[in-house]
Image (cartoon, rainbow, N blue to C red):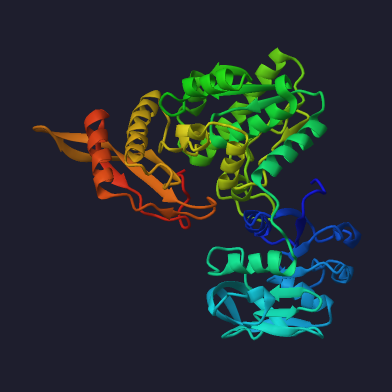
Amino acid sequence: MASAHEKVVVLDFGGQYAQLIARRVRDLRVYCEIRSYKTDPEELRGYKGILFTGGPGSVYGEGAPLCSPEVFKLGVPVLGICYGAQVMAQLLGGKVGPSPVHEFGKTQTAFLGSSPLFRGVPESVCWMSHNDYILQMPEGFISAGHSGHCPVAAMEDPGRRLYGVQFHPEVEHTEFGNQIFENFLYGVCGCQGDWEMASFAQETVEALRSRIGGRKVLCGLSGGVDSSVAAMLVHKAIGKNLTCIFVDHGLLRKGEGDLVEEVFQKEFDMNIIRVNAGERFLSKLAGVTEPERKRKIIGEEFIRVFEEESRKLGQMDFLCQGTIYPDVVESGTGEAAVIKSHHNVGGLPEDMEFAGLVEPLRDLFKDEVRRVGLELGIPSQLVWRQPFPGPGLAVRIMGEVTQEKVALLQEADAIFREEVASFGLEREVNQYFAVLTANRSVGVMGDGRTYGVTVALRAVTTTDFMTADWAKLPYDLLGKVSNRIINEVPGVNRVVYDVTSKPPATIEWE
């Protein structure tokens, strides 16, 4: 990270929200890095502020992750969050122990109005998640917030600019979480907010150029926003040393293959090789019905195709992928449970024939990726294209994948997307698509009875794709889509709408 920018650092104690904290900070136009709690305090002197994350254990447990107490002597403001607040209390002479009542979820919390951290923050709902709490504050600290069962929901020593909160301001359930971060960054740390996505793009390009040098990169280009932005960053860094392999696995949306090829070859002058491998993928998927197995098969075939094309091209040193942060979390890296494997993260062969991976978007959320794409000059119609999973329509077809099912779903999906756009909702709904279910039902068409398949429509609103709510689409829109699909797509006699949020469901059906 270039020293010209003010920056703050998140010290990660093993909590699940380190990246989310960083994202909240970046949204407030302050550059943020994530480093281990083991970082030498001397390396933290250049930062405007330090944030401690939550963590999975107890600060008084054997082997508990604790940073050096020297961090508090740097004169740099510190905000400890949940476990991070307990770390602060423990290291500065306070006492932490089991709380008589464990608090989980939305909790009404009152704050000290004169606190610099809570300026403009009324009594409100915060998201608690703790078994321990601060029994005794360190010398010099006062309580700046309390809930019904937590007398020190927040503590502060304004003279030393040290603050701790027992709740999680980074999650959306904390009503004034953003205001708390803004107060810390601007009111306590004195940040000016000089960082924008243009900075990220420029500095990432420079870092890629430095790392890759004169070596060659192979990029798996799907045409979705993630792989497109990743490819553009690498293209700007190394130009013709990047070769994009566009694998048309026969599972793309209607007309997508031709569009991707035209945009990137003609508009951006990239080296692109289109591989028409539909028959190959479908033969591998024959008879396969289990969703995770589909993903593994497709992930492996992607890499096998890359390897084969790489051999034709000569030595390729790196593989570029459009992995973004929700992919990493959902694939169960670190302590998180596996929700589903993403082809960018899970299911890759162990004998990959590349020296390493290039994943320039690994730390970003979808909305941030879009902003980078616009900064890079990628046309808005491509940046705002619907998110599309790497396995494509294979995980939107329940059961075995066949050519006939793919063709049917392509038509139904195209109608849904076309009508959402005609109603002017394509920017308001974050993701929307059709699913071919495995259900058949009796219907009546004309004078006869039918036994056709059911198409499900899925549409969600979300900011970070970690959680999502089902979109309240107009009935007129849903009615028109249903009518068109049943009349224009042979074999479909029923259309249903999915009204499940994430959690408990995922956005995709498989």
- Horizontal side of residue 14 vs 499, given as left or right: right
- The image quadrant of residue 65 is bottom right
Residue 457, percent across and down? 35, 43
In the figure, 19 relative to 209: above or below? below
- The image quadrant of residue 138 is bottom right
Q: Residue at x 79, y 46 (%)?
A: 1
From where the camera sits, is residue 407 visible?
yes
In the figure, 389 relative to 16: above or below? above
Report the number of discs. Answer: 0
In the figure, 183 relative to 394: above or below? below
- Horizontal side of residue 456 vs 258, given as left or right: left
| Viewer-nearest residue: 78 or 81 | 78
| Viewer-nearest residue: 122 or 53 | 122
Residue 259, percent across and down? 48, 23
Q: Residue at x 52, y 19 (%)?
A: 262
From where the camera sits, is residue 166 visible?
no
In the figure, 157 relative to 321: above or below? below
Q: Residue at x 29, y 49 (%)?
A: 474
- Horizontal side of residue 240 vs 269, given as left or right: right
Residue projecting furthest to the left: 447
Q: Residue at x 29, y 45 (%)?
A: 496
Residue 12, percent across and down? 75, 60
